[in-house]
Image: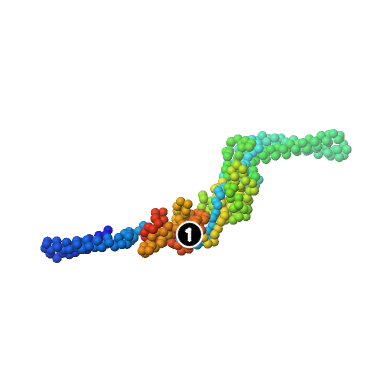
Amino acid sequence: MKYTLTAVMIAAMFLAGCGGGNSREAKQKELAKLTKERDALTAKITTLEAELGKDTVSRNNGREVTTIAAASKHFKHYIDIQGTVTSDENVSVTTDIGGTVMQILVKEGDRVSKGQTLVVLDDNVISKQLEELQVALGLAKTVYEKQKKLWDQKIGSELQFLQAKNNFEALQGKLASAQAQQNRTRIKSPIDGTVDNIDVNVGELASPGRQVLRVVNLSQLKVVADAAENYIGSVSQGDSANLNFPALGLNYAAKISYVGQVINATNRTFPIEIRLNNKDNALKANLLAVIQVVDYENDSAIVVPTRYVAEMGKDYVVYLSDVDSTGATVARRQIVKTGKSYNGETEILEGLKKGDVIIAEGSRDVSNGEDIKIIETIK
C-alpha cells in the first residue's frame, strides 16, 4: 500500500511516453529516471515513519468502532419474583350420590350462575318413590283431616286421631326427604363463573367424590408467589409492583396486597399475593407471572449498557474514545466502580462523567492505546 501512489505515477508517465512515439532507448532512460525517483520517495517515507514511531497508514485505518455518550438518567433496579395466577373461586364440582349421567346442560366456556343446574343424573327410582309417597300422603291427609273434625267434636278416640296425625306427618317427612334426594341428582354450580372443563359424558356413571366438572370465577384473580428470604426487607404490603405476563406480552401496574410473616423452613421463602381485577378475562388461572418490585432507584445515575462493561481481574473497565499526543484517535481503558445492574444496564458510581464518549460496538476487541476509527455515534 506504501507504493501505490508512486506506481500510479510511473505507469502514467510510462504510458505517456509510449503515446509520444519515443524510441526504445528513450523509454529505457525515462524508466530509469522514474525508478530513481521512486526509490528516493520510498526512503523519505521510511524516515518519516521512523520519526513518528508508528505506521501512519495504520492510523488512518484503525479498528472500526461505534461510540455512545455517557448520559445521566433515572435508574431503577427491580427484584424479579416468579408467580402464578390463581383464583379463590376455582371449584371442582362433584356429586355426593352415584348415578348415571342423563343430561349435560352446559358446555365448556359457558358462563353460569350460582345454583344453576349443570348436570342431571338418573332419578327414575326416586321419581317412582315420590309418586307413591304423594299418593299415600294424599290419603293420609284426608284421614287426618276427618279424624281431626271428629276429635274436635269429641267424637271417636284420641288414639285414632293421634295415629292419623302421626301417619300424615311421617309421610310429609318421607316426601321431603325423597324430594331432597331427587334434588341431589341435579348437580348445580356453587358459584358464579365459567365452566372450565367437563369430565363426564352422557351415559357414564358419576361416582361420589369424582370431579364432574370445574367452574372458575376469573373476574377476581390473584398472583401468588414465594419470595426468597433475602428479599424480606425489600417487599412490603402496599408496595407498587409491575406484573409481567410473558405468554401474553402484557404488563400491569399493581400493589402488593399481602406479605406473609413466616419464613418457610423448608425452602426459605415467604408468600406474597397481588390481587387483580380481570374484567376483560385476558388472564387465565395458572398463567405464569413475573412480579417486579423496585428495591433501589437513582434520579441521576450514569448508566452504561452492561455489554460494554468488561471485567478485568478485580476491576471493571470501559473503553473511551480519546486523542493521544500525536492527535490520533485511540482507545483508552477506564476503570469504573459499578453499582446495580438491571435489564441490560449497569449503574456507574465512579470513573465516568456525563458526556464521556464510550466505545460501544468493538469495545470487546480493542486494547488500551489502540488506534480506532469511529464509524457511528449511537444516539
**Amino acid at dot 1:** Gly
Q: Is mark 1 on a helix, strand or loop?
A: loop
Q: Residue at (83%, 36%) from the top-left corner? A: 161
Which residue does the image show at 48% across and 57% down from the upper left?
336
Query: Picture quarter containing residue 43?
Result: bottom left
Between 26 and 156, the one nearer to me in the picture: 26
Q: Give how far across and how far down residue 255 sits, in percent.
A: 60, 54
Query: Residue 274: image x %, image y %?
Result: 60, 51
Horizontal side, residue 360 vs residue 160: left or right: left
Residue that extends furthest to the bottom in the rendered view of this protein: 20
Residue closer to the observer: 15 or 282: 15
Q: Left or right of 202: which side holds 372?
A: left
Q: In this view, does 144 lie to the left or right of 323?
A: right
Residue shown at the point (58%, 39%) measured from the top left:
200
Q: How many labels does the image show?
A: 1
Report crowding for label 1: few under 14, some 14 to 19, many 20 or more residues within 10 A (C-alpha).
some
**Label 1, on which residue?**
351
Q: In which quarter of the image is the N terminus?
A: bottom left
The quadrant the C terminus occupies is: bottom left
Q: Identify the colour scheme used.
A: rainbow
x 59%, y 45%: residue:
268
- Residue 218 in view, yes or no: no
Foreground pick, 219 / 243: 243
Q: In this view of the protein, can residue 302 be seen by the observer?
A: yes
Q: Residue 89, position in %: x, y?
A: 62, 47
Q: In this view, does 148 lie to the left or right of 135?
A: right
List x then y, in percent, for residue 365. Answer: 39, 54
Check the image and name the residue furthest to the right: 154
